[in-house]
Image: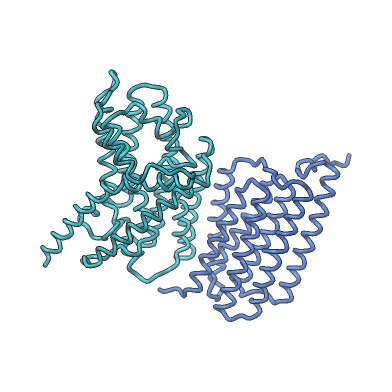
Amino acid sequence: MEYLNLILAILFQLAQLLLVVLLAPLLTGWVNQCQAWLQNRSGAGVLQPYRVLRKLFLKDAVIAHNASPLFRVTPYIVFGCMWLAAAIIPIIAVDLPFSQAADVIALVGVFAVARVFLALAAMDIGTAFGSLGARREMLVSFLAEPALLMVFFTASMISHSTQLPRIVDALAHHQFMLYPSLAFAALAFVIVLLAENARIPVDNPTTHLELTMIHEAMILEYSARHLALIEWASSLKLFAYISIGIALFLPQGIIEAGNWAGMPLAIALLLLKLLAAGAGLAVFEAISAKLRIFRAPEFLGTAFLLAVLGLLIHFLLGA
Amino acid sequence: MQIPLSLQFINLLAALLLLIAFAMLTQRRILSLINLFALQGFVLALSTFVVAYSASQHHLYYSAGLTLLLKVLLLPWLLHRLIRKLNVRWDVETMINIPTTMLVGIALVIFSFNLAAPISQLSEGITRGLIGIALASVLLSLLMMLTRRKAVSQVVAFLSLENGLFFAATSATQGMPLVVELGIALDVLVATFIFGIFFFQIRETFDSLDITHMEKLKDD
């Protein structure tokens, strides 16, 4: 019985690994499709990201003469980091074997590793836009990271653990409570999600104007399979952030240890939540305007403020 | 330890009150400021109602109704009318450094939570944890009065300060006697009228509602 459970857990972990990497472009496609509908366009369909990936993988890569090995290896590191992050977040079941690999603080570290390599690779070629993008990305992320950590600390404080499975367990499977502190943390997390995934108030993912780019400016020099991997990693990052949001603030439906029969329902609920989150993201982007780059610190400062307030309120009210 | 659901709800509303206080502190547009004030009044009325229900204090129902009538409907309507007549509806206030203001706000919140901790030990009501939040929103409104330059937003800050005090009263002591509450409500209403008259006077004298002009009023 023990063995069977372990084998099942490992099987489901592998299934989740495959599921996230295959599902992530679909989520991006869904967000883009929602945006197209909101802008009265017919849109390219939810499968468009797969077509783009296929096209990019079939092309021949062009690499600048002065590129160092760092430039070549970065797409693989970034993709690996994001895949790891998306795979260890409990989205279906709480006690999968890989989820012990990193707690929330290490998870923030995994995101940071990917970001550092991307910024270094952007500066590696020595073009003006690359280093401009890298600096902007660092400006945004060094403000977003403390806010993200504070959000995690609030959730950890409530559940007395920094392990994501334990947090989900404490929030989803114990008696229902209203947590004002988590409401603050959720608001802060949404702001961090928008900033870290280069979404509209901070960055515009569809822009063609180099001067306003942040994330896109960093990857201008990449082509073919390298670009495909980076695009795929961006999809995985969005997927990972949304699933962190689900795990922290909407964990109902994630199944408990050993309850494999609840799996179909858990997967259905997960898909529903992802659909809702993607549509919500598209609506939020449709109703907000891009901020000037120097307003971004104010926006992210708000996230930090909200997260700290959540922490303080937890201390005061114990909830 | 399981907290009753009504108290959880009050806690949530208290947190919302604090959030709105911060939103007002950082809001640049006068119109949105007034809308936020109306929202704050609504949250206040709701929390008073829940306290009334959970502690079965019947006179609190009246004060919840009074709050709803006065602070959600009447005062915002008056203020809307006022800014329309003064033609400052779309004014954007030039404020000093919003991130700094927010950091000072956080420091104020920490200060008031610490200050309220021993006080709330003395209270016996179900909602004693909320004194800190009430105190924090009062101090945030005070900060807002200090950092604003336009007269209208200072008045909104004053009114939201009264909201904070009212919240402290309902959460800590289950509300004041109804006579006192009626008196305060009347005072606030009259104050708003008087402020309205002041606005017109200020504008007539200085052609603007920016109170920095008042520094020119010197007796030499």
Residue at 40% over, 44% down: A32
Q: Is A230 drawn above or below residue A158 in the view shown?
A: above
Left or right of A110, for residue B24? right
**Image position, residue A264 (x, y; %):** 25, 63
Residue A319, position in %: x, y?
44, 65
- Is residue A195 something one can see in this rendering? yes
Can I make out residue A304 in this image? no
Between A158 and B93, the one lying in front of the other is B93
In the displayed structure, would residue B33 be above or below residue A69?
A: below
Q: Is residue B118 left or right of residue B82?
A: left
Foreground pick, B73 / B44: B73
The colour with which the image depicts chain A is cyan
Image quadrant where one finds the C terminus of chain B: top right
Which of the 4 quarters of the picture holds residue B186? bottom right
Task: Residue at 50% x, 45% y: name it.
Answer: A301
Provide residue A15's location: percent of width, then percent of height.
20, 53
Chain coloured blue: which letter? B
Query: Extreme right residue here?
Result: B220
Image-based side of B22 in relation to A56, left or right: right
Residue at 61 percent across and 80 percent down: it is: B57
Query: Where residue B113 appears, x then y in whole percent?
Result: 54, 60
